Amino acid sequence: MSKQTLSFQAEVAQLLHLVTHSLYSNQEIFLRELISNASDACDKLRFEALNNNALYEDAPDLQVRVTFDQAAKTLTITDTGIGMSQQEAIDHLGTIAKSGTKDFMGKLSGDQKQDAQLIGQFGVGFYSGFIVADRITVESRRAGLPADQGVRWVSGGTGDFEVEAITRAERGTSIILHLRDDAEEYLNAWKLKSVIAKYSDHISLPILMEKEEWKDGELITPGDEAGGRQPGGMVKTGEWETINKASALWTRPKKDITEEQYAEFYKAISHDHEAPLTWAHNRVEGNTEYTQLLYIPAKAPFDLWNRDKKAGVKLYVKRVFIMDDAEALMPTYLRFVKGVIDSADLPLNVSRELLQESRDVRAIREGSTKRVLGMLEDLAKHDKHEAAAGGDDGVTDVVDADDKAKEGKYTAFYAEFGSVLKEGLGEDFGNRERLAKLLRFASTASDAVTVGFADYKARMKEGQEAIYYITADTLAAAKNSPQLEVFKKKGIEVLLMTDRVDEWALNYLHEFDGTPLQSVAKGAVDLGTLQDEAEKKAAEEAAEAFKPLLAKLKEALKDKAEDVRVTTRLVDSPACLVVQDDGMSTQLARMLKQAGQQAPQSKPVLEVNAEHALVKKLDGSVHFHDLAHILFDQALLAEGGLPEDPAAYVRRVNALLV
């Protein structure tokens, strides 16, 4: 075909503007991204060649070559991977087919200091070349196509690019960066080797560079006025050397891998600029053999709650890359885990469908889940060292440096991923008890989300028979709920649950270590032995004396309340709403409604405080009907709901105020 000039997709044009004008604080990551893409291209060829060995043509070696030309000011990254056809070059280099591009743009323009650390998260690593280049030339030929169907793609990183057909004997891709004046440091072998060693040492393919040696300057011809010797310099020898270890990091012995290498490998596979919170590297042997290198990130990705986003660890079979997001190897509630699993038992042609059915995959999934939960349990255990270091017995525990480094990490993890972890209560029956021990909440004893069920049980009052909790939209709403008044009065701790997932998750957890969980907003309050006989007798007498008024309230509120009864749970408030023990909470019903889903039609129970002045004023009041409805609507407001008819509520209050 003749040369064509085409326009970039609008998002790409915007991205390129940001790249060329903003991404400069960490230039060197462009090399990490381009080498990573080259490695991926080789992995794809190896995978496709499983069914079509002819794709290797006459060059079976898979490798990446890095060359530079100081005179031309070019840096070239060449791979022997799958390559691109003409249409693939137009599609892959001219558009971004990833969702989340707008979020990426927003992050860049919102805080340009984050710059290039974000670029790989959206599959747009190629464009990072424009951080250092004012023009990029890509020459490629897809494996299996004839030599005359190569393609050349050229762009200056502005609004358009040129594409033309070329003859290219070798398959694969060459990316030629025409470097800007401020990026000439990358025309230096020592600089390139140091960057590659930092970011790409784990790449399992050989990364080659041409050897250099020092050559002395030549003597100037005798008699020349200048005399002396011309300056020497480094010259290329024509021999190639491998500059990375060229072995998959997870296949090496743990003792040979430094913490820095583990961290850099995580950054490479996750495109995260922060080091991971923790990791586990193990070889599992038995009926199913596999190696796992699993990481827990320090920060949640922006798209953690995006249901369309594919998640999962990288799957290799006998060190051959199979897929990026093997969802079947990790449960959904652990979708934040990054890493690699290399199986010795799965077939090389394994598909996503086969992964769902394989017995070996189920074993890997169970083993990996247990490994991740073990990592979290270890972090949770060390989170308490600071408190445990000096006990009441005056003996100071010995805490080693590794333990010290883990302090506070579980709290940090839970702030980022606690809501996702709770999903496991409904998804993973086999590990429900382990998950329950990992959950943390705020409570009436602590606003910090650090209270576990075990902590709560250790502080339970003598005679207390249940773990009490309340769910609400916010911490303030939970702390100030009228349902807590009698618990505060008696000094009984109540867990405050404010995540939207709490209501759903607790449907699958009814007890902890033999102690039932009880919502303070469900059923009649029964504190058992924590309520003395005098209080019980007073409550019974109040209920008896209040019967006529209760009957009138039931009649007035028959369209709103299932029942009206006297309660002992209130101290300062006139009324509150509760649901029956087996009923759906009003908060969950509201959440379903907000999500556009049908919630069962049920009415709450109105509980009134017979000792409150407003309730006493009801008897004989000419405004009884209005006061009854105000009482109900205020109880609804107190728990975060809204009256069905807000205008009617306002009219009633205004009329009484006047």
Image (spheres, rainbow, N blue to C red):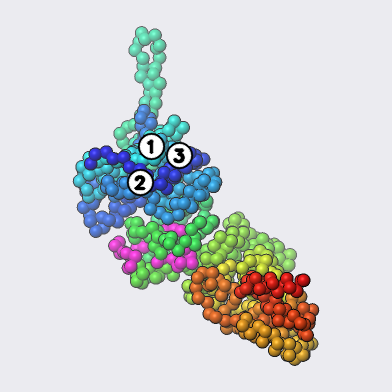
Q: Earlier in the sequence, mark 1 or mark 2?
A: 2
The span picked out in magenta is 328-354
* Type of the residue with mark 1: Gly
Residue 526 image point, x, y percent = 68, 84
Task: Judge whether 622 appears above or below 72 on screen.
Answer: below
Q: Residue at x 25, y 49 (%)?
A: 143
The label on residue 93 is 2
**CB within 8 Å, label 1 to label 2:** no
Residue 213 visible in the current orientation: no
461 magenta-colored: no
Q: Residues within 10 Å of mark 3 (few under 14, many from 20)?
A: some
Q: Earlier in the sequence, mark 3 or mark 2?
A: 3
* Residue nearest the observer in this picture, 606 or 90: 606
Q: Residue at x 44, y 44 (%)?
A: 14
Residue 439 visible in the current orientation: yes
Label 3, secondary structure: give it: helix
The label on residue 20 is 3
344 magenta-colored: yes
* Type of the residue with mark 3: Thr
The label on residue 156 is 1
